[in-house]
Image (tube, coloured by chain):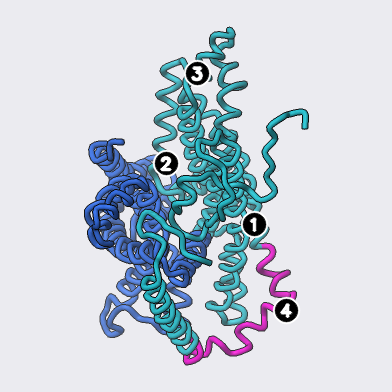
Amino acid sequence: MDALWADLGPDLWPAFWLTIQLTVYSAIGAMFFGTILTAMRVSPVSVLRGMATFYINTVRNTPLTLIIIFCSFGLYQNLGLTMADRGSPTFLADNNFRLAIIGFIAYTSAFVAESLRSGINTVHFGQAEAARSLGLNFGQIFSRIIFPQAIRAAIVPLGNTLIALTKNTTIASAIGVAEASLLMKSTIENHANMLFIVFGIFALGFIVLTLPTGLALGRLSTRMAVKK
Amino acid sequence: MSVRATVLYDAPGPKGRRLNLTITVISALVALAVVAWILWTMQANGQLEADKWTPFLNPQTWETYLLPGLFGTLRAAFFSIILALVLGVLLGLGRLSEFAPLRWVCAVIVEFFRAIPVLLLMIFAYQLFAVYNMVPPRQLAFSAVVFGLTMYNGSVIAEILRSGINSLPKGQTEAARALGMSHQQTMRKILLPQAVAAMLPALIAQMVIALKDSALGYQIGYVEVVRSGIQSASVNQNFLASLTVVAIVMILINWGLTSLAQRIERQLRAGRARKNIVAKVPHQPEQGLDTKDNVNVDWQAPGYTEIKNPGQ
């Protein structure tokens, strides 16, 4: 047990900190691109709609492992995309970390777009018609009437997407990002006799990350729910 | 196709149509520019050369690498979906049981396996099976993948079924109990069949997730489609091309399943009691949002005939 803790203890927080960083950066980026995708997906311009639909269907049906590996092998090795300074001593780690974030953003923004779209779909048609008959223009209808209601309905699906993203960040270990699952893999191989304890520690880490998020967002969505 | 009114915008007038046309032209040009830039970057890095792509015309590439990998993916997905369905039904019914301790145990199992990443489960299962010699060494990675996918997807399916059963009208249970059925009989004969039917789209969507997640086996050395793609790429030195081909194969399979789910959902919706008048309005799935037509009028499936008199 002591030997395990001596091995694991100092690395545990940095690994989970990397998991948190991956989650937060990817969540911000995915929210940004997901919003753009939603705007395209629900626009009256059929070309934009078609492009957004194509992107969402493509990405949602691709395994995330493949996307992450593509970011490393395809974008970096074959197309020469570098995200960090080549001269720096931590080049490889930084580069893989940022490439993984690109992959997570590309993947998660499709799910964010679907969540936001389902939120808009819950707004009753009469709301928009009433606003239009009052003479509000598009900007006013969207910002005062539709968006406030849509975002409330989207809290739960967005929260689920965030939790899924937190768990998905483990896949970054496929290209060698030193986050929690990579540490667990090496620890469990070196301390195979204590595999239940090692698994328990890492499972607990993820439960601490995901369960409060789910509970808090669930409570928020109940409080913010649009009364109908 | 004409643009229909949605909650965000009304059907456009002449001015709106002109604006839409302008945006169409601009966005098409931007899209073309992006495609051209991607192709140019690939060309500049030598990724468009014929020898990167010709290996996929060679049957040997498929026979040696891609097809065994695809088979591995489908095998893992198939077994884990079957097992997950069994586990999901057991856990789902357990959470609705009349026996409180069983409810708690099932709730803890479901919440635990939904909260932790599937990859951790697979790594754990791999070591567990290896240390205690639980499976033949050749099947180690396969068993770990199936274990991870089964536990996760089984828990999710349990939740899908539970919410499906909970969303059924209370009268169903009450009527069954009034007829003297036991809790078990009510579940098995009345509630579960309806919940499965209503939740069929969600269940199929979960199968797509299981199929996609089987690619996680890449990280514990299971030979699935991504790993076989990488192996063929190391031989031919064409990572980008190889991963693209693998992606296309996976997208086609998953897209087929997703379309099936959507089709079933539409048919289920068409079979439900209609609250609106039924009219021949064009169904517009590509509009992105519910159109005004869809909201106010029930869509009629092509070839649908209303049978007013069952003797007809």
Could you tell me which chain the residue with mark 1 belongs to?
B
**Residue that extends furthest to the right in the rendered view of this protein:** B312
Q: Nearer the viewer, mark 3 or mark 4?
A: 3
The amino acid type, in three-letter code, at marker 1 is Gly
Q: Quadrant of the N terminus of chain A?
A: top left
Does residue B312 appear left or right of residue B3 in this picture? right
Q: Main secondary structure of the magenta part?
A: helix
Q: Position of residue B32 (x, y in %)?
A: 46, 83
Q: Which residue is mark 3?
A: B171
Q: Quadrant of residue A194?
A: top left
Q: Nearer the viewer, residue A52 or A58?
A: A52
User: Which shade of the palette goes to chain B?
Assistant: cyan
Dot 3 or dot 4: first in sequence order is: 4
Q: Amino acid at mark 4?
A: Asn
Which chain is the one coloured blue? A
Mark 1 vs mark 4, foreground winner is 4
Q: Residues within 10 Å of mark 2 (few under 14, many from 20)?
A: many
On the image, numbered disc 1 is attached to which residue? B72
Nearer-N-terminus badge (1/4)? 4
Q: Are marks 1 and 4 on the same chain?
A: yes
Quadrant where the C terminus of chain A is found in the figure: top left
